[in-house]
Amino acid sequence: MSDTAKWYVIHTYSGYENKVATSILNAVENRKLQDLFSEVKVPTEMVMEINKDNKKKEVEHKIFPGYVLVKMIMTDDSWYVVRNIRGVTGFVGPGSKPVPLTDEEVARLGIELDENTEESAKSNIRLSYKVGDSVKVMSGYLAGFIGTVNEIDLENQVVKVTVSVMTNDTLVELGLDQVQNLE
């Protein structure tokens, strides 16, 4: 048993992640075990969704549904507290032995951020269309035209569409929200 807090992954029933995290924090406080637990996280990200009506909406999504991350010192007491929370199915690891995340895994997951480092402003976008789909141009000088999606550039938030203008196929670059999937 180590006296250093390490990150552990807890498996939960799907949809119970936030309840489990709150219950762990409450149990730690009630049992006065704050010296064993550093953090409890349900990793989430904000995702920009563009639906078929071309409405943008920012939605919070769980990055690892069914899992909660806990930074704690592993002792019999801390193990018991976590294992006996309603909704917890167990620790991730072989058998019943919890295995902490390695430093590389923690870095790769971006769980801990250096105080001098800013979180990346990487935005996730979900579209109602994909490459090869037929779309209708909703605004701009080609509004009303039908085209085919050739390429989607999420980083620059543009879509390249081939539109037939007077029998000539023309490749145009439009904003992601300027086209709508034909369904």
Image: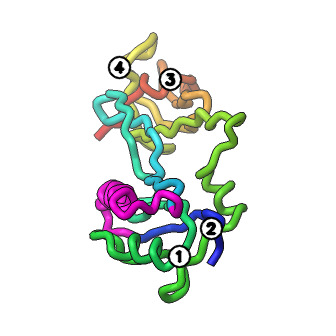
- Which kind of residue does numbered mark 4 sit on? Gly
- For marks 2 and 1 on the same chain, the one whose residue lies earlier in the sequence: 1
Q: Is residue 161 above or below residue 7?
A: above
| Dots 2, 4 in contact, CB < 8 A | no
| Dots 2, 1 in contact, CB < 8 A | no
Circle 2 residue: 101
- For marks 4 and 1 on the same chain, the one whose residue lies earlier in the sequence: 1
| Dots 4, 3 in contact, CB < 8 A | no
The residue sitting at 53% across, 76% down in the picture is: 75
Assign a secondary structure to mark 2. Answer: loop
Q: Is residue 30 magenta?
A: yes
Residue 75: assigned label: 1
- Which kind of residue does numbered mark 3 sit on? Gly
Circle 3 residue: 175
Residue 13 located left or right of residue 132? left
The magenta stretch spans which residues? 12-36
Q: How far apart are marks 2 and 4 (CA)?
A: 53 Å
- Which kind of residue does numbered mark 1 sit on? Thr
- Which kind of residue does numbered mark 2 sit on? Leu
Q: Is residue 98 above or below residue 121?
A: below
